Amino acid sequence: MSNTLSPNDQVRVRMAPSPTGYLHIGGARTALFNWLFAKHHNGKFILRIDDTDTARSTDESMHEIYDALKWLSINWDEHYVQSERRNVYDRYVKQLLESGNAYHCYCTPEELEEIRAQARANKQTRSYDRRCRNLTPEDVDRFVAEGRKPTVRIKMPDIPIHVNDLILGSRNIDPATLEDEVIVRSNGMPNYNLTSIIDDAEMQITHVIRGTEHLNNTPKQIAIANALDLKLPQFAHIPLVLDDTGRKLSKRHHGDLVAVNRYREQGYLPEAMLNFVVRLGWSYDDKQEIFSVDELIEKFDLARVGKSGSVFDIKKLEWLNSHYINQLDVSARTDAVIPFWKQEGLVDSTTNRDWLENIVEAVGERLTTFQDIVPQTRYFFTDDFEYESKAVKKWWGGSDEKKQKTREILTNLGQILEKIPTFDVETIESAIWKYTDENDIKRVAAMQALRIALTGTSFGPSLFDIVLLLGQDEVFKRIQRAITCL
RNA sequence: GCCGCUAUCGUCUAGGGGUCAGGACGGAUGGUUCUCAGCCAUCAAACCGGGGUUCGAAUCCCCGUAGCGGUACCA
């Protein structure tokens, strides 16, 4: 008989990814909930790589998972890899076989498929008919002679299994719905439902916090634990993270779009990702949206986790990310942005740091991701840009007459800026206003015409900042070029 | 097919027998400004349906419906 946890045991939780791909948003949330729960209770967070599916597990994806977790600062206190623990599982399997709680199954995949099809046609609840439970020695000899390699199945009990879930509540599972699960493959490799619950016990996990896709595995694992007389953890099944059509987020269907590492590469901040992901299914009250990690550790509580799935909304992530970016000072923002400039070949180690900081300062609160720096500031580094046709049409003019007027304005502006006494924002500003106001030219019209000449687009930071950062010579050059292009 | 879970604005959610059903993202409008972003102000937007219980139900109960998850020698 399993006994339950005593309340003053140290909390030990685990995240148990299978290394069959990158860590996605849903996995990150599972990791975070576990980690926060551990931190909140002063417990341990354990990372366990569930790689018993040797065919699909890769080293590469294992390292991707490590990287993603490290980026999020979800650090682990202990680390295990299941494929290195074969002897542990083998020992328990032996025990199960000897106690009569498990048996060898010689059914071939083809036979099983047939049995399943039959059960389905008959609208049966259970698909496997447990035929190998009562094999005669002669049957076994025959199968062995045929060269069949058996799997091992667990015998499910015929009494209801009680499951208490910290989020979903308690219920009793009808034994008639329980399958004699395969716990060891014919190649000798143990399966998830076996290894998971064994390790949870061996590693003294107190709380299993995982996605609801595992809800149906829980009674199976409890049955295995009971047969082995293992101590049971508490279970908490958290609702799934969904895409905008309401389906579970998965690597297969959503590709890179949901990969945590992808967001890092695009210039998202881990704080934003954490803050975003924690609010998927969890809330503190009706006021607070922004939480620091320390606050989360203090406030996180499974009791406030909801029961229904949450849709992954990138707009909200973007909002949080710009919030956290704007929280950073100019120097930190510059540090964060430099790799993206370098990646585009816009900046190298010789580029003047102060000038770069001034650009970042000018860009101000316009970044949603650090990656945005590239399209928003490219024109500072190169004059190799196109004039946006929509902007040109609106501000430079569609008719020859308007174009002529624009040429005139740009020419005048060029002359003014060329011989400006002191090249600073205040002087530039008053000189331009003086010109527009005295000649009865709309400020917008002059400024937008100049903006397009200097940047190719009709929007961006304060034009005075741009003029200053580009420098007198470059500004004059670009104005001359614009005039000839008009 | 079978087993299970879930159900408040488009989205994340608060509330949980008597509330103008609150907040946030997103959207719309206006203001500020050389543009965009931002900021400020304003607005639209929800209790899945039907029965009960009750003086009163979004809230409790039942029945539907819908969506999702599982149904592997994956995890």
Image: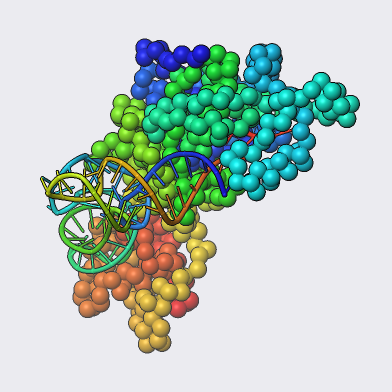
* Residue found 55% across the figure and 35% down from its top: A177
* Residue A133 visible within the image: yes
* Left or right of residue A232, residue A129 in this image: right
Looking at the image, residue A235 lies above or below residue A42: below
The residue lying toward the viewer, choosing from B22 and A378, is B22
Looking at the image, residue B11 lies above or below residue A241: below
The residue lying toward the viewer, choosing from A446 and B50, is B50
Look at the image and tell me in which quarter the C terminus of chain A lies: bottom left
- Picture coordinates of residue A451 (x, y %)? 37, 66
* Residue found 40% across the figure and 86% down from its top: A399
- Picture coordinates of residue A281 (x, y %)? 38, 40
* Left or right of residue A480, residue A299 in this image: left
* Left or right of residue B62, residue B39 in this image: left
- Picture coordinates of residue B16 (x, y %)? 21, 39
Q: Quadrant of residue A9?
A: top left
Looking at the image, residue B51 lies above or below residue A333: below
* Residue found 25% across the figure and 77% down from its top: A441
Total number of numbered discs in the rendering: 0
The residue lying toward the viewer, choosing from A6 and A357, is A6
- Picture coordinates of residue A33 (x, y %)? 42, 31
Q: Quadrant of residue A444?
A: bottom left
* Residue found 77% across the figure and 41% down from its top: A110
